[in-house]
């Protein structure tokens, strides 16, 4: 199988703190892969490195066989990697629909002048953006709230809105940072169905998650981090039976 | 542009057309001319502050660049006012671009301080380079604008020119807000982190809107120079930069309409406060204080809130009926 993302010997230091220490893994195209580990294991840092928010101290990140470390976040988004955030980062000042319309940004071209002068091609592009955004809202089931301000949505729906917005960029690789955090078990179940549906549409998914039931349910493979180091990698069954993983989560036995 | 904006625009244009029919006193038309000049600047600032979430305390400098470029080119280089107007735009845009690249990397208070510093530098240059600008005493005899056979000299012709330009700038800006680029700008205000992750080149868009707002200020400056025919640095000091920012904040940063409301209020207030004589500045300050305490989201926010309350009441009334 072709690997869509390859992380090689990744290191990130913040001053004296080593947040990520020599981590390597691959994500195969069409896979759902999870990164798990106790708090402070470096999971979100890895996401920030992949999406260009932080730059790695050492190591290499390759997306579709080309190196992406050093690129700016918006360039990485344009290449086909999108993400959601652990602490929901919506555009509170905009409507639900407009939030998703922003997601079409890297797939559209209208500039300042043609936008302000309402040139015909801008108008037709605007209609296309609207249609595409409504499709994504429909997909996550938020189409009826399209005109509400994003800030007024209940928390669970805000997570879905972030998902719709990320999908609007037509990502080939979607990074989900604790998508189930703050959701009740019913909502988490709906989320799991959505994630599986997204994968069916051909999008590869890499997620960080604490909800173990969700992770074990939907992941094809799991990477386990502890103190910035990779301690295990494999299928959910393999990982659950790994002694190092059990120690990291439950503490070492007598 | 949305139905709401079209209606507001229609009301504004209607009011502007009717106003001179009822208000024959050229003095008040003159006040409206100045409100128009201020509006050009505050619409741009509203895009920068309210939509892109960036502040500038140095917009007097762009107003000055427009005024001085137009003034110097027409008095010393033999330019006609119209080509000078466009040259001034080009020059101001270049200055704003060069200043924007380093300063827009800053955020919040730091950005405010950097733009304030830039405004002061321009102010000092205007005072110091005496052979070009006439120094602190400025220079006069700037020719009036000639459009075809019409010489823009009377208050009413200035009124028509400046408000036509305001309406064009307003339509341009409203179109921009409700477009791909406008949404990108607003997303920066909402969450720069998420905007970047959605592929928005935030630094590019910030500079674009900064340059655009500088261009609007330059237009106002050029017109100002040809209207009053005499310019000196004292019109372009820090007080001016603060005044235009205050207009935007008082009116409300949530829309460009807020900027217009604020500009009208602070433009008319000194006229309305004439009866208070020496105490006018006290009352002026008190009015500002009241607005900021009771409607921190600006006057436009107050209007929205009243509308919301009314809708709630009518919903309740309907519920009672059924």
Image (cartoon, rainbow, N blue to C red):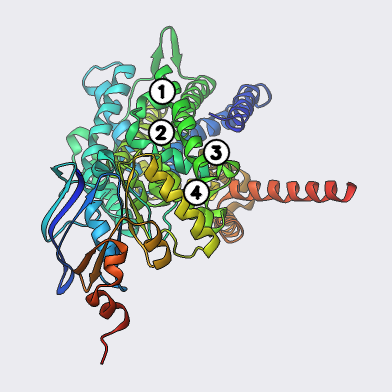
Q: Are marks 2 and 1 in contact (CB under 8 Å)?
A: yes
Residue B12: x, y in percent? 60, 29
In front: B285, or B127?
Answer: B285
CA gap between label 2 and label 3 equals 20 Å
Where does the image place residue B285, in percent across and percent down from the top left? 54, 57
SS category of the residue bearing label 2? helix
Residue at 41% across, 29% down = B228
Q: Which mark is residue B180?
A: 2
Within 10 Å of disc 1 (Cα), the crowding (few <14, some 14-19, many 20+) is many
Residue B81: image quadrant is: top left
- Labels 2 and 3 positioned on one and the same chain: yes
Q: Is residue A91 visible?
A: no
Camera sees residue A51: yes
Residue matched to label 1: A122
In x, y percent, where is residue B251? 54, 46
Looking at the rendered image, the quarter that the C terminus of chain A falls into is: bottom left
Cα distance in 3D space between marks 4 and 2:
16 Å
Say which residue label 3 marks: B257
Q: Nearer the viewer, residue B100 or B62?
A: B100
Residue identified by numbered label 4: A93
Q: Do the residues marked 4 and 2 share a common chain? A: no
Which residue appears at 30% of the width and 54% of the height? Answer: B111
Q: Secondary structure at mark 3?
A: helix
| Badge 4 vs badge 1, beta-carbon distance below 8 Å | no
SS for callout 4: loop
Q: Could you tell me which chain the residue with mark 2 belongs to?
A: B
Q: Against B306, is B230 above or below? A: above
């Amino acid at each position: 199988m072709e690997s869509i993302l390859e992380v090689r010997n990744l290191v990130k230091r913040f001053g004296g703190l080593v947040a990520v220490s020599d981590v390597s893994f691959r994500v195969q195209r069409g896979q759902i892969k999870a990164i798990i580990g106790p708090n402070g294991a470096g999971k979100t840092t890895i996401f920030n490195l992949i999406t260009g928010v932080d730059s790695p101290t050492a190591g290499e990140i390759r997306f579709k066989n080309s190196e992406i470390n050093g690129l700016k976040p918006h360039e990485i988004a344009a290449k086909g990697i999108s993400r959601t955030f652990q602490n929901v980062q919506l555009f509170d000042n905009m409507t639900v629909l407009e939030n998703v319309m922003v997601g079409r940004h890297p797939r559209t071209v209208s500039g300042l002048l043609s936008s302000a002068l309402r040139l015909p091609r801008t108008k037709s592009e605007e209609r296309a953006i609207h249609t595409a955004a409504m499709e994504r809202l429909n997909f996550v089931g938020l189409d009826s709230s399209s005109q509400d301000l994003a800030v007024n949505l209940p928390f669970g729906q805000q997570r879905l809105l972030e998902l719709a917005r990320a999908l609007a960029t037509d990502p080939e690789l979607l990074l989900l940072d604790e998508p189930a955090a703050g959701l009740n078990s019913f909502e988490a179940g709906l989320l799991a169905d959505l994630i599986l549906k997204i994968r069916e549409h051909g999008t590869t998914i890499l997620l960080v998650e604490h909800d173990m039931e969700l992770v074990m349910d939907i992941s094809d493979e799991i990477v386990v981090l502890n103190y910035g180091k990779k301690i295990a990698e494999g299928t959910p069954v393999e990982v659950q039976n790994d002694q190092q993983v059990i120690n990291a989560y439950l503490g070492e036995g007598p | 542009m949305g139905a709401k904006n079209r209606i507001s625009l229609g009301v504004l244009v209607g009011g502007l057309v009717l106003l001179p029919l009822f208000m024959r006193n050229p003095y008040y038309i003159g006040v409206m001319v100045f409100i128009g000049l201020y509006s050009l600047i505050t619409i741009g600032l509203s895009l920068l502050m309210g939509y892109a979430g960036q502040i500038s305390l140095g917009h007097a400098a762009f107003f000055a660049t427009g005024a001085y470029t137009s003034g110097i080119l027409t008095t010393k280089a033999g330019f006609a006012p119209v080509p000078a107007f466009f040259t001034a735009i080009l020059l101001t845009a270049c200055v704003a671009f060069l200043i924007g690249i380093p300063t827009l990397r800053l955020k919040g208070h730091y950005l405010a301080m950097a733009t304030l510093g830039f405004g002061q530098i321009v102010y000092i240059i205007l005072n110091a380079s005496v052979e070009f600008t006439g120094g602190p005493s400025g220079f006069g005899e700037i020719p009036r604008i000639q459009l075809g056979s019409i010489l823009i000299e009377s208050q009413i012709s200035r009124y028509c020119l400046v408000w036509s330009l305001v309406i064009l700038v307003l339509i341009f800006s409203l179109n921009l807000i409700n477009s791909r680029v406008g949404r990108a700008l607003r997303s920066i205000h909402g969450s720069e982190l998420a905007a970047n992750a959605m592929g928005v080149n935030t630094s590019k868009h910030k500079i674009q809107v900064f340059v655009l707002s500088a261009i609007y200020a330059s237009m106002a400056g050029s017109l100002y120079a040809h209207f009053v025919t005499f310019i000196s640095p004292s019109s372009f000091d820090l007080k001016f930069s603060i005044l235009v920012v205050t207009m935007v904040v008082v009116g409300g940063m949530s829309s460009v309409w807020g900027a217009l409301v604020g500009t009208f209020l602070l433009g008319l207030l000194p006229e309305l406060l004439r009866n208070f004589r020496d105490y006018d500045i006290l009352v002026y300050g008190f009015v500002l204080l009241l607005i900021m305490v009771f409607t921190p989201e600006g006057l436009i926010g107050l209007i929205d809130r009243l509308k919301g309350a009314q809708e709630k009441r009518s919903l309740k009334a309907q519920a009672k009926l059924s």
